[in-house]
Amino acid sequence: MSNIIVTPSYRDHRGIGLIQLNRPNVLNALNTETLVDIVETLESWSDIRAVIITGSDKAFSAGADIKKMAEASAMDQLLDQREKLWKRFSMIRYPIIAAVNGFCLGGGHELAMSCDLIIAGDKAKFGQPEINIGTVPGAGGTQRFTKAMGKSKAMYYALTGEMINAAEARELGLVAKVVPASTLMQETFVVAKRIASKSPVASSLIKESINQSFEMSLSQGLMLERRNFYLTFASDDQKEGMNAFLEKRTPDYKGN
Ligand code: DAK
């Protein structure tokens, strides 16, 4: 059985790629092979405008594969290629949406937080439970968690390992939208379709500017934002968008 199920341009949703984690026996635990499959798939797509990553009704992902990790040495961990894979994931230019039902824990939660936005079913449960198994988050849990919700809450959840329900996750700013669990994919496609109808040039520059806001001072971030604004004027999409507005028609973006 393959680790992921890949559907480019799912059904009639042109330009939207779907990746579904497919390790049901271990609640979609992430081993290195699964990360390789995800990253290589994302890198192989060129005509995609938005991607949805999802799991099953029971679990988006319960984190890194504990069976694989239990006997690993520090050197095994250091030499594993996962670190590079997470970096490659962060270099993907088009928007990636995590559609989360069920458990979204540890490395699974870090994968969801590494996506550009999270849409959650109302039964979803998030958390960094590494403390329960004698270790610590290793793929951004302490960092992205803290940036999303501030120090005190991040400390609370990372130190207790307590799970966060969907409503709390929305209040904390971890997720963009909570929808009924049974309509998660339908609702996520509505959002993905809306994103896919916009200029891919503009959406990749917005993605870059917002993600860089975590790395830069305000003045550096504002400078990057202005440069990206100017850069859109080198694209046909900017001309198309503004002319379509003036001509009172729907724009047809080509992505260049
Ligand atoms: N790994 C392997 N197997 C897992 C798993 C996991 N993370 N989570 C669940 N499973 C397996 C269970 O062992 C069980 O297998 P069988 O016994 O049926 O063979 C099956 O999935 C169903 O699980 P449960 O029977 O436990 O189901 P429940 O509904 O009772 O409980 C649960 C669901 C999600 C609460 C529970 O399974 C659980 O607590 N799972 C572990 C969650 C966890 O601790 N996650 C954090 C793992 S550490 C890094 C990158 C990433 C990471 C670190 C470094 N670098 C780049 C450096 C990430 C680390 C982690 O994520």
Image: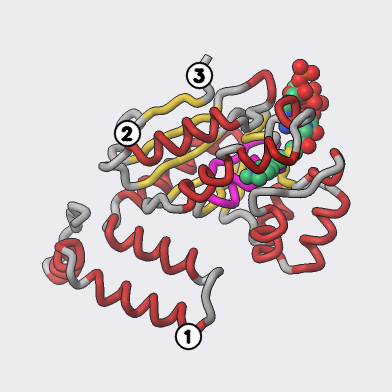
Q: Are marks 2 and 1 in contact (CB under 8 Å)?
A: no
Residue 109 appears in the rendering: no
Residue at (41, 63) in percent of width and height: 208
Is 48 located above or below residue 65 in the figure? below
Q: Nearer the viewer, mark 2 or mark 1?
A: 1
* Residue toward you, 231 or 10: 231
**Badge 1 local density, few (<14 within 10 Å), some, or many (20+)?**
few
* Residue toward you, 58 or 256: 256
Tag 2 secondary structure: loop
Q: Is residue 103 magenta?
A: yes
**Left or right: 8 with respect to 64?**
left
Farthest residue, direction bottom: 219
Q: Amino acid at mark 3?
A: Ser
Task: Say which mark, if any, is on residue 2.
Answer: 3
Q: Earlier in the sequence, mark 2 or mark 3?
A: 3
**Badge 3 local density, few (<14 within 10 Å), some, or many (20+)?**
few
Q: Amino acid at mark 2?
A: Ser
Which residue lies under the disc numbered 2? 9
Tag 1 secondary structure: helix
Farthest residue, direction front: 75
Cα distance in 3D space between marks 3 and 1: 46 Å
Q: Is mark 3 within 8 Å of ligand 1?
A: no
Q: Amino acid at mark 1?
A: Ser
Which residue lies under the disc numbered 1? 219
Where does the magenta region start and end?
98-114
Residue 126 in the image: state x and y as whole percent: 71, 45
Residue 195 in the image: state x and y as whole percent: 36, 52
**Left or right: 242 with respect to 29?**
left
